[in-house]
Amino acid sequence: VQLQASGGGLVQAGGSLRLSCAASGRTFSSYGMGWFRQAPGKEREFVAGVSFTGGSTTYGDSVKGRFTIFRDNVKNTVYLQMNTLKPEDAAVYYCAARSTSSHLILTARKYWNYWGQGTQVTVSS
């Protein structure tokens, strides 16, 4: 599967952005999908994940209550709605896919098979 992320940009603290990740291929609905982010000098960290059906979601502690991940299996797209953005949310955001038949969402980077190219999110204070 090939992934194309978009929607990044510059936003003021407290604002919102919605990221999108379009996937190629006919088997999108068999992949768990996720978002990771990487700030300069830091490790890539898990942000959010959604199961292949969309019925289960998991979030990193730093974004719980502010970010929402959801998917549209007709449009082959996963989204990350980001609200109440903080300067520390600034990073390159990557979408990822994991081929799985499980509803379990794994947060470690090593379990994700496919990666998009990343989209930059900048948050001004």
Image (cartoon, rainbow, N blue to C red):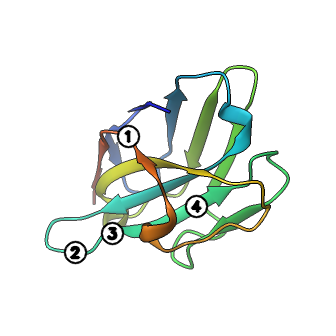
Q: How many marks?
A: 4
* Quarter of image, res 49: bottom right
Q: Residue at position x 49%, y 54% from top? A: 35
Disc 2 or 4, which lies upstream in sequence?
2
The residues bearing labels 1 and 3 have C-alpha atoms spaced at a distance of 22 Å
Q: Mark 1 = which residue?
A: 116
Is 78 above or below relative to 68?
A: above
* Crowding at mark 1 (Cα within 10 Å: few <14, some 14-19, many 20+): many
Tell me residue 64's x, y (percent).
63, 71
Q: CA distance from mark 2 to mark 4?
A: 18 Å
Q: CA distance from mark 3 to mark 4?
A: 16 Å
How far is mark 4 from mark 1, CA to CA? Answer: 15 Å
Disc 3: which residue: 88
Question: Which of the marked residues, 2 or 3, is nearer the chain's N terminus?
Answer: 2
Residue located beneath label 4 in the image: 48
User: Amino acid type of disc 2?
Assistant: Lys
| Residue 76 picture quarter | top right
Of callouts 1 and 2, the N-terminal one? 2
From the image, state whether disc 3 or disc 4 is nearer to you. 4
Q: From the viewer's side, name the closer residue of 45 and 97.
A: 97
Question: Would you name the residue on which mark 2 appears?
Answer: 42
Is label 1 or label 3 in front? Answer: 1
In this picture, is 81 found above or below 88? above
